Each structure stands twice: as structure tokens, then as C-alpha cells.
Image: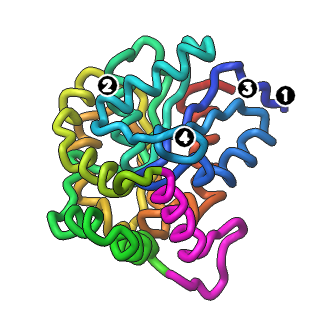
Amino acid sequence: MSAFHPPPLPLVLIHGAGGDASVWAVQTAWLTQRGWTVLALDLPAHGATPAPPLPSIERMAEWVWAQLDARGIAAAVLGGHSMGSLVALQAAARRPAQVRGLALLATAVPMRVSKKLLQLAQDDPEQAIDNVVRWSYAQPEPDTPLPGWQPPQAYRQLLLRQQANWADGSVLASDLAACDRYAGGDAAARAWGGPTLFVLGEFDRMTPLAQTAALRQALPHSRTVLLDCGHNLMAEAPHAVAHALADWMERDLALA
């Protein structure tokens, strides 16, 4: 069997609400070791990118293309988790000819957020973060954690760090509001229409499986991988996510 030689085409990964590029650490390390070029971005007010956060999914998608243009990246595979999946979808719809494939993890269209959580994120961000962390895991303490598994407390600390990046407001509240307001998902799916991977948690309470049905139907050139986990699947099933991405790119997209 011939060795796998990945093309220079990068996989660009976009984090979810309140996160940063570090949520992809296990997947980035594994895929890079396999030979892929992976670019995990920090959206504004997240990670190393200065505040303030961008107020809409559309603005975030524009920002992503600005980053790729600045790096001279003319074509890529896009992937995103939760809020990042909406950003990736919108970005793919803007420039479909420059996107080879689209990976949507823990997604939903529309991605409505409860009014109670939106208000709590404004009034008591730390309590809102505690709720998000609790709802993001299927099993807070599995009997036999998978290699690379990250505990809820680590996720909580990550969200708190992002919150500290913007002293004038709540990063989580801004992100959740952007998800809740985004109404362009159906149109974006029609504009994209290309090969798509869905990686979904069977026990996802933030974006339940039923909320992906219409989007999956709208994207017929797709594959769905169901994992035994909740919403934070990069932390609960880190290597399963990495394998799903690699298998899809190397087989379905024929990038091997």
C-alpha cells in the first residue's frame, strides 16, 4: 500500500461559543502527525485574538475569509463546532468554489438559545458557564475515560479565560446571541450544497440530533457520524472526532 501524502490544502477549524482554538488540540496534534495541515482559528475576543467579539455569524464568516486571504490560502476544507459550525457554513456559502468540503460538529439550524440562558449570560456569566458545561457532557465522569478525554472542569476554566478577554461585556453572551439571531442557515446550505460531514453526539442536549434533520436533508452529499457523547464531543471523544475527520477527507473527498 502506498503511503498517504496529504495535499497542501489545509483543514481550517472554528471553535464554538466561548471557546478558542485549544478545543481542537487533540485533533490538531493527531491530524498534523498524520501529515495534514491544520489551522485552528481564535475568533475575535477568544484566545490570542483581541476583543471585542463579532456580533453576528455573518461577520465572523467574513473575518474567517479575511484571515485566510491574509495567509494566501485560496482553498480549504472548513470545519466548525457548534457556533463555529454556523460560521463554517456561512463561510462556505460565501465562497463555495474555494471550499473543498465542510465539516459540521454538534450543529443545528436554526441554533436557538433559550431566553433564560441568554439573560443569565448577561447577568451572571459564571453561572451561565456552569450551566453550559453541565449540559455539554453526556457523562461528567466516565468509568473508563477515552485517551485525550478532557474533564468538565478544564472546559469550565477555558470558558472563564475567554470571559476575561473582554472586560466590557460577556463573551459568552455575545456568542450565544449571535447563534440565536442567525437566520441564514437554510440559504447558506442551498448556496453551499457540497460534500459535508456531520459529526454529532447522540446525547447532545445543546444541539439535539432532531434539530439537525432538516439541515442534513438539505445537504444530500453528506455523511453523518454519530458518537457516544454529548455536545462537547472534541473533549469527550477526541480521537473519534479526529478519525472521523481524517476518514472523510481521505475517502469521501479523495484528498489522499
Question: Is 239 contained in the magenta span?
Answer: no
Where does residue 19 sit, x and y in percent of width and height?
A: 49, 54
Which percent across, then down, holds residue 104?
Answer: 42, 43
Work out whether 7 lies above or below 110: above
Mark 2 falls on what kind of element? Answer: loop
Closer to the camera: disc 2 or disc 4? 4
Determine which of the numbered discs, if any, sits on residue 42 in the image: 4
**CA separation in Å, label 2 and label 4:** 26 Å
Q: Which element carries disc 1, helix, strand or loop?
A: loop
Residue 100 sits above or below residue 138 on the image: above
Mark 3, residue position: 6
Report the residue marked by disc 1.
2
Mark 2: few, some, or many residues within 10 Å (few <14, many ≥20)?
some
| Amino acid on which the number 1 mark rests in the picture | Ser
Placement of the C terminus among the 4 image quadrants: top right
Q: Which numbered disc flags the more N-terminal residue, 1 or 2?
A: 1
> Which mark identifies residue 59?
none
Mark 1–mark 4 distance (CA, rounded to whole Å):
36 Å
Query: In the shown orientation, is residue 212 left or right of residue 77?
Result: left
- The residues bearing labels 1 and 2 have C-alpha atoms spaced at a distance of 32 Å
152 vs 96, nearest the viewer: 152
**Element on which disc 3 rests:** loop
Give the magenta range: 140-165
Q: Which residue is mark 2?
A: 193
Q: Residue 233: x, y in percent?
A: 51, 61
Q: Nearer the viewer, mark 3 or mark 4?
A: 4
